Image: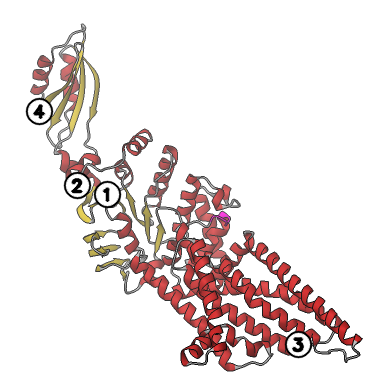
């Protein structure tokens, strides 16, 4: 659906996007990930024909962005970082204007407006001025605007930026529900968002492509086998971690065990298991049969955040507050 | 063409939903009304004096009033035109809606044409305010309407040219005030640069006088349609719109 080859955008001296190549299949949701200023927006703007590339090619649905921009524009729905709204227009009127711009007319236009208003849950603000809408509504009107002509490709630039946790969840669900009909690229610097919504990730940093893979692969690439966090408590109020460690190590399938936290009554261990082997049942049984209490057992999955840091080798990931907000919304 | 209509409608709506259109209409109605009233006073005074001297009643006075009233219109236009054009592109650039227009399957030319036509329509509404006053002349006398129409055509063409320049300047900045101020300066400059021709007949002065919008108005105010002057205004419009198109295109390469 989208093919990008050696795409480059150079400003005066520095390259905002530096020889990026990737391919996106039809119907996928792709996360475009990178710290602020990595070149995400620039790349998206080149795909939407807003900016011409300095070098390289990009084709959308088989049409080159430089050679046949009109054909590309017909097939793309684009939500820029700030939704492009006219504050003095009513929501319905705005959708009708954008629909007209995208070539919809008459009954078809009307039907599409009804459809997107319902889909994006903005039917109740159709007669309100855009300038008076809340941030969440604006973002949804922005999305409605992007899908009004049922485009093959949806390009969303930080669709959840500035929303509250509830709105973020709603927007993500909406985006997920759009996949299948549309090929979606969404950019973000918030990692959990990619984990939750996307199937494929493209990571860029300082204009260069760092990695492109599926979310699952990227995660397992970083962690190898899946580690499990186990909290064990002694029944009579005291616990010797060394004994526990020795017992757990005997369970088949366990590669390594590390003491994470030690308290007089209970301790936490990280157990690394062999790949593709499900040992949790054995692990639990072993602990209980030894006369201890199993307080907690959970997988300590490596987050994309760690993958991201490993890949980019930088510290400038998402600002702390935002990470907290998205965490709370899970 | 449908896209031009779409943009035109959107722009017209934004003039008339916001107070902009009404404020401009009231300003123009007030000023044209004042010009008309003061000209009428002068005319009454003059005809009274003529009658007392036992002279003939000056029959071409209604035309004289109209001509003088029209003489004031371009000056009013100098102040009004920047107010009409300053937001056209500057506003879209500031709010980011320009991204919507440039990523939609619509040509730059259609956007520009739609916006410029909306601006000329807006200005025509203001010109109509002066027609209200001229209408009074028809109530009480029989002025020849054909030269008046030619004068209106001239005023319209001149304004359309200056509006095209204003549209171009609006693409240069995100700031409406700067766009407005620059448009005012540019229009004033092409308006007054013809004055050098009045006391200087060297080639450069004649060229400058030719380039000025004010020197091409004379034939229209006399009620004669001179193709040379009409072509000048049409050229001005084309130059303005051409520069707008170039500027919009370069916007993509620069930003």
User: Magenta stretch containing residue B79, yes or no?
Assistant: no
- Check disc 2: other Cα within 10 Å, few if <14, some if 14-19, many if 20+: many
Determine if marks 2 and 3 fall on one subunit.
no
- Location of the C terminus of chain A by quadrant is top left
**Mark 1 sits on what residue?**
A34
Tell me the CA gap for discs 2 and 1.
Answer: 9 Å
Tell me the CA gap for discs 3 and 4.
Answer: 101 Å
- Check disc 4: other Cα within 10 Å, few if <14, some if 14-19, many if 20+: some
- Residue A300 coordinates in the image, percent (x, y): 22, 31
Q: For the magenta stretch, what is the residue range?
A: A87-91
State which mark lies toward you, 3 or 1.
3
- Residue A167 coordinates in the image, percent (x, y): 44, 41
Mark 1 or mark 4: which comes first in sequence? 1
Tell me the CA gap for discs 3 and 1.
Answer: 69 Å
Viewer-closest of B38 and A92? B38
Q: Chain of mark 4?
A: A
**Mark 4 sits on what residue?**
A256
Mark 2 and mark 1 residues within 8 Å of each other at the beta carbon: yes
Q: Residue at x 44, y 60 (%)?
A: A150
Q: Which disc number belongs to residue A312?
A: 2
Q: Chain of mark 3?
A: B
- Check disc 3: other Cα within 10 Å, few if <14, some if 14-19, many if 20+: few
Mark 2: secondary structure: helix
Mark 2 or mark 1: which comes first in sequence? 1
Q: Chain of mark 1?
A: A
Q: Is residue B126 above or below residue A241?
A: below
């Amino acid at each position: 659906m989208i093919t990008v080859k050696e795409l480059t955008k150079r400003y005066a001296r520095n390259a905002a996007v530096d020889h990026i190549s990737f391919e996106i299949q039809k119907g996928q949701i792709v996360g475009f990930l990178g710290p602020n200023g990595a070149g995400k927006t620039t790349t998206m703007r080149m795909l939407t024909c807003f900016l011409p590339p300095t070098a390289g090619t990009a084709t959308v649905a088989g049409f080159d962005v430089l050679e046949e921009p009109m054909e590309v524009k017909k097939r793309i729905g684009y939500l820029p970082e700030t939704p492009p709204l006219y504050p003095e227009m009513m929501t319905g009127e705005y959708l009708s204007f954008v629909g007209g711009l995208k070539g919809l007319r008459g009954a078809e236009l009307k039907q599409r407006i009804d459809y997107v208003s319902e889909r994006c849950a903005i039917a109740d603000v159709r007669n309100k001025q855009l300038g008076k809408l809340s941030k969440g509504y604006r973002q949804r009107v922005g999305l409605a605007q992007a899908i009004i002509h049922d485009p093959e490709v949806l390009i969303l630039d930080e669709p959840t930026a500035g929303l509250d946790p509830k709105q973020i969840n709603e927007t993500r669900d909406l985006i997920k529900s759009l996949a299948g009909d549309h090929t979606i690229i969404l950019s973000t610097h918030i990692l959990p968002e990619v984990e939750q919504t996307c199937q494929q990730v493209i990571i860029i940093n300082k204009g260069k492509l760092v990695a492109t893979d599926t979310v699952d692969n990227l995660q397992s690439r970083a962690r190898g086998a899946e580690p499990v966090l186990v909290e064990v408590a002694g029944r009579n109020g005291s616990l010797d971690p060394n004994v526990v460690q020795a017992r757990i190590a005997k369970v088949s399938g366990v590669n390594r065990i590390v003491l994470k936290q030690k308290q007089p009554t209970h301790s936490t261990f990280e157990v690394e298991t062999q790949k593709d082997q499900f040992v949790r049942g054995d692990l639990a049984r072993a602990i209980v049969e030894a006369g201890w209490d199993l307080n907690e057992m959970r997988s300590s999955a490596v987050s994309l955040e760690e993958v991201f840091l490993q890949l980019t080798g930088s510290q400038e990931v998402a600002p702390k507050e935002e990470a907290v907000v998205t965490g709370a919304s899970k | 063409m449908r896209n031009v209509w779409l943009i035109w409608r959107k722009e017209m709506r934004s003039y008339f939903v916001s107070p902009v259109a009404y404020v401009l209409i009231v300003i123009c109605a007030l000023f044209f009304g004042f010009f008309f009233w003061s000209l009428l006073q002068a005319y009454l005074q003059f005809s009274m004096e003529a009658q007392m001297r036992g002279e003939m009643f000056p029959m071409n006075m209604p035309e004289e009033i109209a001509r003088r009233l029209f003489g004031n219109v371009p000056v009013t236009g100098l102040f009004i035109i920047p107010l009409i054009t300053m937001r056209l592109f500057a506003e879209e650039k500031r709010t980011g809606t320009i991204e919507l227009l440039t990523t939609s399957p619509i040509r730059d030319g259609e956007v520009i044409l739609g916006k410029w036509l909306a601006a000329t329509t807006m200005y025509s509404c203001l010109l109509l305010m002066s027609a209200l006053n001229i209408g009074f002349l028809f109530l009480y006398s029989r002025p020849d309407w054909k030269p008046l129409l030619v004068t209106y055509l001239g005023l319209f063409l001149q304004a359309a040219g200056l509006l095209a320049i204003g549209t171009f300047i609006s693409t240069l900045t995100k700031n409406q005030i700067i766009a407005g101020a620059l448009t005012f300066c540019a229009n004033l400059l092409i308006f007054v640069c013809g004055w050098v021709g009045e006391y200087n007949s060297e080639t450069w002065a004649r060229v400058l006088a030719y380039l000025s919008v004010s020197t091409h108005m004379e034939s229209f105010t006399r009620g004669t349609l001179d193709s040379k002057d009409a072509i000048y205004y049409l050229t001005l419009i084309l130059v303005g719109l051409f520069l707008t198109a170039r500027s919009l295109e370069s916007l993509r390469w620069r930003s």
